[in-house]
Image (cartoon, rainbow, N blue to C red):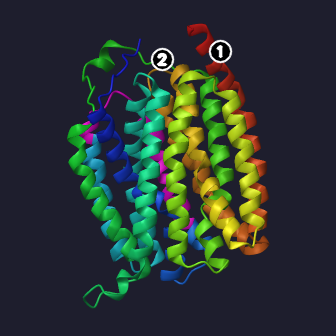
């Protein structure tokens, strides 16, 4: 039987802060993609390939470290991971071509996956896991506001940075990510530490039910579908004639939604079955995707894009609360990011091709197709979690 962790407020803050500081570059992915395309004078497809490779590496590391949930010293993972993230972001600043940038992003991505999988595995072993995930993802909303405010103002840094180095727009973004990863080191001492070096020899790891892994696959498909348009929101807004600062406010709005949506979802996931709320959220994602992809009205985009961008943050707490019932060891919750990011990793590349050849309207309708497919795949696992909930009651 897996021992549940009772998190103090300080531990929850530390856990959330470490994850956010490690994951900052991924939260700014839409800005990164746009800045890479401009800085290296390349296409959406090539910039999407870089971001896809980075997300795929995060997914690989997440899956690797999910299998070690509860069997590694969390502190060592956090210190090593954040240090590698700092080095990788410095390498991205120094990169002078796409291959060099790609290598740096792959190294950093693996470290990000290690840190975030360890955080999520710990959260999955907590009491009232759905609420814990709601608060953590709510913290992601706070960070999204910070990122959306800072990144547009970091883009022009290349114009004032000293020296003969060939600075570019994207370098300002990676300077921000270096600073945030360094700040994350401070919060490690606040995080919970339930590592037991003898646990592996005393207990046998119980395999999670197949329905849980199938549900994670469905979650990955849903996020792949959302990412086909979501990762290009900055490009959509810029192509409509909106300034980077305005897009920053759009993402700040998404951050505000991203605070309240997951907290509300965490409450729902703690008190209600998971299947119906997730079906409702999928329908909302489909509707807002069509509006964002087809509108040419600035105000409509300004109001709906933040909602579309942040709706997946409401899916995660309910979904992971369900998975923590299916697998109390935290293995499924730690692994969720791998499945999620496998889908997200492919989305920038495929979405770039769709937008280059068919316009963003194609991306919008593709969102609907894949989130519905993902829901269909995930339903057996969600319903199994609901049956376990009823049996426990």
Which residue is the site of mark 1?
Answer: 387
Rendered view: 39 above or below 198: below
Task: Give the magenta part as a residue range.
Answer: 49-76
The crowding category of the residue bearing disc 1, from other C-alpha atoms within 10 Å (few below 14, some 14 to 19, many at least 20), is: some
Circle 2 Cα neighbour tier, 10 Å, few/some/many (<14 / 14–19 / ≥20): few
Quarter of the figure with residue 301: bottom right
Compared with 21, 200 (above or below) is: above
Query: Which of disc 1 and disc 2 is earlier in sequence?
Result: 2
Q: Is residue 68 magenta?
A: yes
For image coordinates 48% across by 39% down, the residue present is 63
Q: Nearer the viewer, mark 2 or mark 1?
A: 1
Question: In which quarter of the view is residue 168 placed?
Answer: bottom left
Residue at the (36%, 42%) spot, across then down: 16
* Helix, strand or loop status at disc 1: helix
Residue at image position (20%, 40%) is 189
Q: Is residue 259 visible?
A: yes
In the rendered structure, the answer to whether residue 32 lies left or right of residue 7 reads right
Quarter of image, res 200: top left
Whether residue 36 is visible, yes or no, is: no
**Dot 2 lies on which element?**
loop
Residue 206, labelled with which disc? 2
> Where's residue 196, x and y in %?
26, 22
Locate residue 310 relative to residue 74 in the image: left or right. Answer: right
């Amino acid at each position: 039987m897996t021992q549940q962790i009772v998190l103090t407020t300080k531990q929850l803050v530390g856990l959330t802060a470490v994850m956010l500081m490690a994951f900052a570059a991924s939260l700014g992915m839409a800005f990164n993609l746009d800045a890479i395309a401009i800085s290296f004078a390349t296409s959406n497809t090539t910039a999407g390939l870089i971001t896809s490779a980075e997300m795929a590496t995060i997914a690989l590391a997440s899956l690797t470290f999910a299998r070690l949930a509860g069997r590694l010293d969390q502190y060592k993972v956090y210190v090593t991971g954040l240090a590698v993230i700092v080095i990788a972001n410095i390498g991205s600043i120094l990169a002078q071509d796409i291959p060099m940038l790609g290598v740096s992003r792959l190294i950093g991505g693996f470290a990000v996956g290690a840190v975030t999988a360890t955080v999520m595995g710990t959260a999955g072993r907590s009491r009232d896991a759905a609420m814990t995930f709601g608060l953590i993802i709510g913290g992601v909303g706070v960070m999204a506001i910070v990122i959306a405010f800072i990144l547009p103002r970091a883009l022009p840094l290349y114009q004032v940075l000293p020296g003969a180095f060939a600075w570019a727009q994207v370098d300002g973004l990676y300077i921000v990510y270096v600073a945030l990863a360094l700040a994350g080191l401070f919060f490690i001492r606040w995080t919970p530490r339930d590592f037991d070096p003898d646990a592996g020899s005393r207990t046998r790891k119980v395999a999670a039910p197949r329905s849980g892994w199938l549900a994670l696959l469905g979650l990955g498909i849903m996020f792949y579908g959302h990412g086909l348009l979501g990762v290009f929101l900055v490009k959509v807004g810029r192509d409509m004639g909106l300034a980077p600062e305005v897009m920053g406010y759009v993402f700040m709005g998404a951050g505000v939604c991203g605070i309240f949506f997951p907290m509300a979802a965490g409450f729902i996931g703690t008190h209600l079955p998971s299947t119906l709320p997730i079906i409702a959220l999928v329908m909302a994602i489909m509707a807002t995707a069509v509006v964002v992809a087809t509108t040419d009205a600035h105000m409509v985009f300004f109001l709906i894009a933040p909602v579309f961008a942040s709706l997946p943050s409401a899916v995660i707490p309910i979904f992971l609360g369900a998975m923590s019932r299916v697998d109390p060891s935290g293995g499924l919750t730690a692994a969720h990011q791998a499945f999620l990011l496998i889908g997200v990793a492919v989305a920038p590349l495929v979405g770039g091709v769709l937008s280059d050849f068919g316009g963003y309207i194609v991306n919008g309708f593709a969102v609907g197709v894949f989130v519905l497919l993902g829901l269909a795949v995930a339903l057996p696992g969600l319903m199994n979690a609901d049956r376990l909930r009823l049996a426990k009651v």
